[in-house]
Every structure is written in C-alpha cells, then in structure tokens.
Image: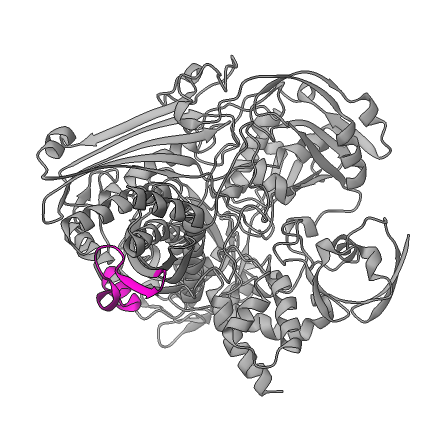
Amino acid sequence: MAEQKLKYVNHPIPKKDAEAIMGGAPVYTDDLVPPGTLTVKLLRSPYASARITAIDTAVASKVPGVVCILTHEDVPKIRYSFAGSNYPGNNPFDRYILEDVVRYVGDPVAVIAAENEAAAIRAMKLVKVTYEQLPPVLDFETAEGNASVVHDEDDYFYQMDIGGDIKKNLLSSEGFEHGDFDAVFAACPVQLDETYYTKQNQQAMMETFRAFSYVDYSGSLTVVSSTQIPFHARRIIARALGLPPAKVRVIKPRIGGGFGAKQSLVCELFPALVTRKTGRPAKIVFTRHESFSASNSRHEFRVGVRLGAEKDGTVKALWVDSLENAGAYGEHAVNVIGLSAHKTLPLYGKASANRYTGRVVYTNTMAGGAFRGFGATQGCYAVETTVNKMARQLGLDPAAVRLANLPTVGEPMPAYYNETLNSCSLDRCIATGKKMIGWDEKYVPGSFGRKTGPHTYRGMGMAITMQGSGLTNLDACSVTLRLDDDDYYTLMIGASDMGTGCDTILAQMAAEILCCPVENITVDGVDTNHSPYDKGSYASSTTYVTGNAVVKAATQLVERMRDVAAQKLNVPATTLCFDGTTFTDGEKSLTVKEIGIESVNGQNDWLTVTASFSGKASPPPFVAGFAEVEVDTETGKVTLLDMVGVVDCGTVVNKSLARVQAEGGLAQGVGMALYEDVRYSTAGQLRTDSFMDYKIPSRLDLPNIRVAFEESYEPSGPFGAKSIGEVVINTPTPAIVEAIRNAVGVEIHSLPATAEKVYMALQNSKMA
Amino acid sequence: MELHLTLNGKPVSKTIAPDASLLNFLRECGCHSVRSGCDTGNCGICTVWVDGQPLLSCAYPAARAEGKNITTLEGVKAEADELIRYMAEEGADQCGYCSPGFIMAVLGMKRELQNPTEKEVKHYLAGNLCRCTGYASQTRILQKYLAEVQNNG
C-alpha cells in the first residue's frame, strides 16, 4: 500500500472554501447575524479576588434600548466546565455562568443585552457593584497551601479522582515512574538539574471569540459559534443552562483561527442565556482586549528536568517535574500537564528510567485552556534545552546526541502510554534539517563562536519534538458519505475546520477511494442537528482520526455501489472493476451516475454510509527544528536569521496546506521564544492585553521560515498519515534559546528571550 | 449625522452615529470583506482604501470619509480574485480572516511601488498581521504574483 500511486492525497489541492473566505463572502459568525439581534456586553471584575455583596442595576436598566441585565441571581446554580474535551473526563466542574465570587480581573459580573452596542456599553457603566476585596493568589509557585483559597465553594466537584486538594489550591497531582529513577540517576557520570519557566501565551487568532443565538423553528436554542467543538458545546450549553441536550443546537460557520482557544466555551453561554431569558436573538463579539484578558491562554509552567547520562551522551535517566498554573478555573489543565512528560521523555529511547511528577494549582489569574502543543510545548523547551546543555558539557554535537538516543521503530515507548512506535523518520528529519541550515559548515561548538561585527555574534541551535495524533481510546469521530442523485457525493462531517483545511483534506481522502475529482465531493459541516458526531478539532486528531473514518466510509460506499451494480448487471460483485465512473466486468457496465439517478427513482436504495473511528493508538508525528540567530551584545537584541523545520507527519495529505500550517506553527513558536511576553500588575491586572503590548511576530520579525517533509508511513493512519497541527510549534523555543547560548554564552531559563533579558544575562555573566 | 461618500464607485448617503468608525459603517453597508481584528490599529485586517490610499478603517471615523472615495475588496473583486487564485494555489489562506485586508494592502502596494524588492514588500505589508501562516507563503506568492502581473502590464 505504501507504494500506491495517489491521485488526490499527497497533492497540493486548494482549500474548498478559499474563494469565499479570502474574497469577503459572508461566511464567518458575525456575517450571519440576523437583523434585530440583541448585542450582549459583559461587565467584568476589576479585582483579582472579591466577593460581590451587592449589584444595583436599576439605573442601568433605564438606558433606552437596554432589554435585560442579568447577574448571578439570574443564572442556574449548576457547576460546569467549559472545556471541550472528553466526557466524562478530568475537568473539574468549577464554574457558574455568573457567580457572587470573582476570581480574576475580567471574570464576568453582569450580562447586559441591548438593542445596540452603544446602549449596552452605556448601561454597563451604570451598573453599580459593591465588592468585598480579598487578597488574591497571583504567584503560582506559592499558590499551594496559600492562605487565600481560589475555590472554596461547597458544590465544586470532580468527575473523577485527580489527586487535588482545592482547599490548598491544588487542582490535581499525578505522576508515573518507569524503572528505578533514583538508582539509575545516581549511577550516571553526567547529571543535570535544571529549571525553566514559560508564560501564559495567547493564541491570538485573528477572529476573536464570538457567537450568536436564537430559538429555531423547532424551539431549539440554536447557537452559531466560532468554535472548534460543536458537539461538546451542545452538551456543555445544555448542562450549564439546565436544558435537555435535544433542545440545543450548535452551528459552526467558517472560523477565523482557533489554535485551541476555541476548544473552550468562552463566550457562547452569554448570548444563549439572553436568548433563553428574552426569546430574542442575541450576539456577543469579544473585543481584542477581552480576548486577551478574559478568555483562556497557554498554561504557565515551571518545569524541572533532571537528566542522567553516560559520558558518550546516552541519556539513561530523565525526570520531568512540572508545576502548572491553571489560573482561576480548571479547564483543560489536568490534561495539559501530563503532556510535558509524555511527549518529551519518549524521544530519549535509551533511557532505562523515567519519572514524571506534576502538580496543578489554582491562582487568581485568567484560566489557561488549550493552545497548540498543549503542555508538550512547555516540556519540549525544558527537556530539549537540558539535552542541549548536556551535549555542550560533554563536547558533543547536539544533533548527534539526538540521533544516538532516538526511540526504535517497533519498540514500545514506556513514557508514551506504552504505545509501540510504528513510524518515525526523525533520523532523516535531523539529517535534512542539518543540510538545509548548513549545520556542518556553520555550527561552532562553545560560546561566542562566530563574531560578525564589533558587538554581534551568531549562533545555532536545534531541538526535536513529538506530539500525538488524537487521543487514544477517547475520541469518536464519524462521517456520513452519500451518493447523491447523480455522480456526486456529499461528505458530512462533525470535524471543525478552523482554517486548517480539514474540509478539503478529508474530501481528498474520499476522492482517492471514490476515484473522482475532489470537486465532486461536497463537504458539509457543522450543524449538530445533521452532522454525524465528531468530538471536534483538537489534539491533532482530524487528519488521523476523522481521516480514518472517511477511509472507512468511502471504502464501504464503493462496496455498496458495487453490490447494486452486481445486482443490476446480474454478475458476481467480485468480477466488477471500478474506475470512479463505471463498474464493469469487461462486458456489462453501469455508471455511478446511473446508480445515483436510480437510487432516487426507487429502483435501488439511497446509498448512505456512516462510519466511525476511534484511535487505538495516537501515533506521534515528529519535527527536527533548527535556528540561527544573531545577538547584539550592546542591546541584547536577538535577530532570527534562519528557522528550519523538518517534519515527519507520515504521508503528507495536502502538500501546500501542510507546509503553510507548519510554517505558521514554527512562527508561533518563534513568537513564544522571543516576543510574546505576559505581564500582570501586582494587583493581578493583565498588562499585555492588546497587540500593542503583546507582540506577535510580524513579517519583519521573521526570516522566510523553511519547512521540509521527511515522510514516514504510519500503518494505522489514513494513507499512512499522522497529525501535523500541533507538533510544529514546539521546537523553536529550545532551538532559539540554544542558538542564543551558542552565540553569546548566556542561558535563558524563562521565556520569552527578550532583548532586556538577554542583555541582563550578559551583564550578570560579565560580573560573575 | 448624514454621510455622503462614494463606495466602490457608487454614491452612498446614510445616517450615521457621529462616533461610528468607517469599519462599522462599511459592514453595515454589506461589505463583509471588511473585518475587525484588534481594535487598536495594529493588525491591518480592516484595511480599505480612502481615495486610493490603504488605511485602517477601524481607526478612521466614518465622518471623516465625507465626500471621499472608499474602496473595499468588493470594489476590486476581479483584481482581488486573481491574487486569491495565487494564494489558494499556495495554501496561503489558512483561516482567511486576515486575507481581504492583506489583499487590499497588496493591491495598494502594486499601485504605489514599481518592482519592489522583497525587503520593500515586507516593509510595506508589515502592518498586516497573520497568525496562521508565518508569512513565508505570502512572500512566495507575492514574488510570483508581482512578477507575472507587472510583466503582463
């Protein structure tokens, strides 16, 4: 099968929605709002921790155009989690839609609905709230056991035991050990013990959070949302509002980016609540300020790494010890932390002992959520930077150290849920990346290797990473494929294309099996009333998990059509060949078009197939990333000169979309490495709450990022494919931090490596 | 207040709130290509032309557009579609949300700069942010697009 000639898969096919999304067609959420829709605005807490003792809405309610103002007294007292992930699962139920307690600056206090935005904003300023301020917990390292408790409510509950103690701000704790870490580590001649910090980075998709709601013809509360998780959204909305799920419907239009941010129900419940109360359509569009300060972000981490190795660089013992800041609510936090170990440790396949310990704490800062990489990114920075340091101490080439430690194909990976590695071309990724960046010609071991000016130095660094392809035994993704009343098909999916192009790549897979042009397949998604169930687009799952469902459905549909043709032609089905348009045994033949037409004339069944897939494993994709920087020792400014990522995502399903997704992921990693700083005031106010303060890379801040693919073949994947969505973000942070170290000798242990941080580190190293 | 201007070649008169932004005015006129990204004039997504000059419509009061000639992507659709084809071929769209603003900036640049270098292109477009692509694909298509379009007159 690996050698098959592919006609549609593995080709650079333009996205099905390209013309609409780029050409300004009304296809995004805010384009579809019906006339007469109420505008919803949220009054938010100015305090990081407070109890609301009174809310007076009397004056605000008199503002002309105001329709309702809702407070904690108007919402169901039902604890829920707005994290869109498997259910039952390990997200704590720690929220009300509105509560008389506020837990971070930005926590909603009142929902204002008005005929227009101006009236809503005017009323918002007139709501009088009396707060009893409480001392907040802002520092996650001192949160556990702190006198201030973030969650002390009686009806807080876990769906399962996750090792938490909320009276001590401990949301969860976990760990595992493979082999005897202490003994193996103690026997190692090379020992490192390092600590690293990462921040609450912003996903910063260009379309902010938004949704609108209305009651449809059947009386269902319908929510149109820019979401990655329509089916989870339906379940969560029903729970939080105390409705039967059958009375909730979620529709996903085109999405202006997500990167994980829209894997949580950040905004949907507010208009939904208003529609419930008023019966009228209602919409909410977050400002960029709200998107930054009152939604979700990457979780802040402290990662301790203890590494024991032989003198030849063979890693024998590796311990990842993670502390994670959940923020004020626990969405996704428990799932995120483990990935800092599960997706870093397996890369060092010669280790005989692994240990992982993790603790998640609450603080009075904005809750973390899902962001591309999901813990693996934080872990990758820490572990790979430690490995780079080990290589340096031993005088070894860091690329050679990676090659010497790679996990072996065919062997189980104890730190990766004991799953067997069935495809990996990381060795080729490293070799290709070295060639592309000119590693052998340009890399000079040690510090201050290449002086390029009176006070500028160049350095290089590299790192490797892995992610997963969906969640083992947890995801369920289904598709429905039907032959329509001619020779075209409709592929109905519940997977949520958020710009990544899954509508297109899933059609490519179906086209490959149906032997028809991609144009002959209409892709429809997502409306929970008619789409087949898919848990949504997250955890790098769509290509692999939903893709496998498409392969199943298309294969079954061809067999259904073959059976109909065999019956009509009165020949055995096994004698019929299919070329995409015709079934023939060489003498008699029947076209797909004839089957399609006859299926609506009552002469044969309407041919529809629904297939589901759930991964029995989560095959890891891999990336080898390489960076070259120039550092100015007078200013600390780091200029990224080159960034190369070589990707093993199995078979590349769509060569142009995968390339651009990889380039974009690497760019986000560069932002995390160099620019994207998150700062709070001492009172817990987010200071980096706009694009003026939170700098994402512009095109002047990036070199032309270069991506290559070293395809492997994943036997369990659709056409040999694995995921690509997340793995691409991980390598820039350790590669760039090592390149800085290689250039000027300073180690950066907390991201981002801003100019002032590099400059101060240089000053400190001079003084030392 | 009453606003009179030319929108995509056609005269438009409409009552507006004095503090209305050009962005909101244009969306109310049905120009869905005009989208908001940042509210602070940082991202370039809301780029339109005022008298042929690319400007940020989120930071431009609608009242200031009195008597002016406003062009959105809808007004240069055929030209935009040509660039869109290049972008689609390269997969440079991804979520597409920032594309109309980017396209308006590129078409504005095409009128302003003759045979710009890659560096000049990046400087001209620096205010157009994109979170999906990392810009490399945009650089690739612009090299092709500008060369071919300018060669074809």
Name the residue at 44% across, 21% down: A158
Q: Is residue A710 something one can see in this rendering?
A: no
* Residue A22, horizontal then vertical, whole percent: 61, 63
The part of the image, by quadrant, that contains residue B70 is bottom right
Quadrant of the image containing the C terminus of chain A:
top left
The part of the image, by quadrant, that contains residue A64 is top right
Name the residue at 35% across, 48% down: A762
Quadrant of the image containing the N terminus of chain A:
bottom left
Question: Of residues A315 and A536, which is closer to you in this image?
Answer: A315
Instruction: Please tell me whether residue B89 is drawn above or below residue A311 in the rendered image.
Output: below
Q: Is residue A680 magenta?
A: no
* Residue A117, horizontal then vertical, whole percent: 77, 41
Q: Is residue B110 left or right of residue B5?
A: left
What residue span does the magenta drawing correspond to? Answer: A430-456
Instruction: Please tell me whether residue B83 is drawn above or below residue A87 in the rendered image.
Output: below
Q: Is residue A432 magenta?
A: yes
The part of the image, by quadrant, that contains residue A688 is top right
Q: Is residue A390 left or right of residue A653?
A: left
Q: Residue furthest right?
A: B2
